[in-house]
Image: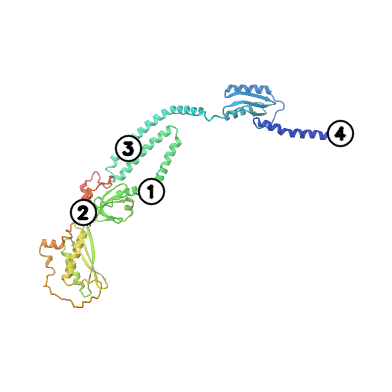
Amino acid sequence: MLVASCVLAGIVPGLRAQDSASRMPVRALSAADSGDLSLAQTKVDVNPVARDEEIRRRLQRVLEATTWFASPRVRVESGVVFLDGRASTDPLKTWAGDLARNTQDVVAVVNRMKVPTPSIWDFGPAARGLVTLWRDVIGALPSLAFGAIVLVLSLGAALLTIRVARRVLEPRLPIKLLRTVIVRALGTLVLLVGVYVILRVMGLTQLALTLVGGTGLLGLAVGIAFRDITENFLASLFLSIQRPFEPADLIEVAGVTGYVQQLNMRTTVMMNLDGNVVQIPNATVYKSNIRNYTTNCNRREVFDIGIGYDDAIAEAQEIARRVLAAHPAVLDDPEPSVLVDSLGESTVNLRVYFWLDGRENSWLKVRSSVIRLVKREFQANGISMPDAAREIIFPKGVPVTQQPDVDPRGDLSPGPETDQEIVSTKAEGGLHSEASMIEEQARQSRKVGETNLLEPTSGATAASATASGAAGDTK
């Protein structure tokens, strides 16, 4: 019996402990469902100093004094604080829980305050936001007024800088485009300094630093986005500095031959030899080979002519040389030459070289006249000019008629009028250059409407520019 009593005495308390432990999660769960639980303290006093009623009165007074809560109620049991009532926002509900948790001898906090859900038709927050915005605007008026004053002063300083820089650089820097770029860059720099001061005064320091640091990045982005425009602009700047041609110069670039009218920010405007206005992008002009026929007025022309194998080469060369020496448009210095170029299938090919003044005469007309006269002299002196060999049969024979002897050079020396008629026929229309006619057409044509970067500076005159860029030969 004694042993049985001892066993029962050990088992019964164990069963009671297990029963109480099995019921504890149910009570804790119900408490958790009724409100927000705070973390349990790591240390709980057995004999607290502050009583539950003292804790309740203290918390109740604090919550009512704030006037932040509607119908706040505080209940304390064994150091556990229960909070009831309504809080307007979640941060206020959290604040009340933290207040109770930090109170002396509080073991835990059950925050059961309700936060009402705002209605979708509640315009209170919007009204409060507008009021706040209006107060901010009123408070920023002094800064805005100061910023406006600084901005006006910056604009005035930028315009003054541009005007002074233009007057200083105009006599010292003859390149108009480069002068314009430098002047505008100085004005923009002064304006950016004013904007930076405004942003710093208004408290936007980070934005000011971003503006200053991002100017280079913005320029890089714009350069990439507008690559072609930027490339043409830089090419126009380099062309205006190097000046490989002047207005009214006859040039050949990118397969186009014509007279230069103007160089603007994007294109080079030319009038070709057919009277058509052609615009070529400056980037293409800068990267292409440029032939300027006006820089040196003398121009060499060449043509080929074939004679028969039975003819004397030296005699044919001398005849062609005499024609070149007697021609009024062919220059004596450098002297013309007639060279043997090659031996063809049926002819000995001669190549004729001669020089002419491209400013006075048309190279196409002079070339036509020289070829015509050389051919006539070869025929008059019995120099054959056969074509490709072929066999022709005449069944009835070929009648032969003898012509009276004619002086082969008798028509080259009768007099000035006869010489001119022989040298240039009516079909050739004279040997003079057509540059003046094309220049007149260029002046009468509609302008592109942009600034000509090749215009003479203030110290130069239009007459000197025309003299330096006199037109060359034309078609």
The residue drawn where x is 11% and y is 61% is 417
Q: Residue furthest front?
A: 396
Residue type at mark 4?
Ser
Q: Earlier in the sequence, mark 4 or mark 2?
A: 4
Report the mark closest to the observer, 4 or 3: 4
Label located before the other in sequence (2 or 1): 1
Q: Which residue position is annotated with label 2?
A: 435
| Residue topped by disc 1 | 227
In the rendered image, the vertical position of residue 380 relative to residue 176, given as above or below: below
> Label 1 vs label 3: CA separation?
30 Å
Q: Residue furthest right?
A: 1
Distance (Cα) linking label 4 and label 3: 112 Å
- In the picture of the structure, the residue carrying the numbered disc 4 is 5
Confirm or deny contact between disc 4 and disc 2 (CB under 8 A).
no
Q: Neighbour class for label 2 at 10 Å: few (<14), some, many (≥20)?
A: many
Q: Is residue 310 above or below residue 181?
A: below
Mark 1 vs 3, N-terminal side: 3
Question: Residue at the location (20% across, 48% down)?
Answer: 463
The disc labelled 2 sits on which kind of residue?
A: Ala
Q: Position of residue 429 (x, y in %)?
A: 17, 58
Say few, some or many: other residues with alpha carbon within 10 Å of mark 3 (under 14 / 14 to 19 / 20 or more).
Answer: some
Residue 387 is situated, as x and y percent measured from the top left of the image, at 24, 71
In the rendered structure, which amino acid carries the disc numbered 1? Answer: Arg
What is the C-alpha distance between the residues marked 2 and 3?
A: 44 Å
**Mark 4 Cα-neighbour bin, 10 Å: few <14, some 14–19, many ≥20:** few
* Secondary element type, mark 3: helix
Asked whether the residues under the numbered discs 2 and 1 touch, taking CB atoms below 8 Å apart as contact, a structural biologist would say no
Q: Mark 2, mark 3: which one is toward the viewer?
A: 2
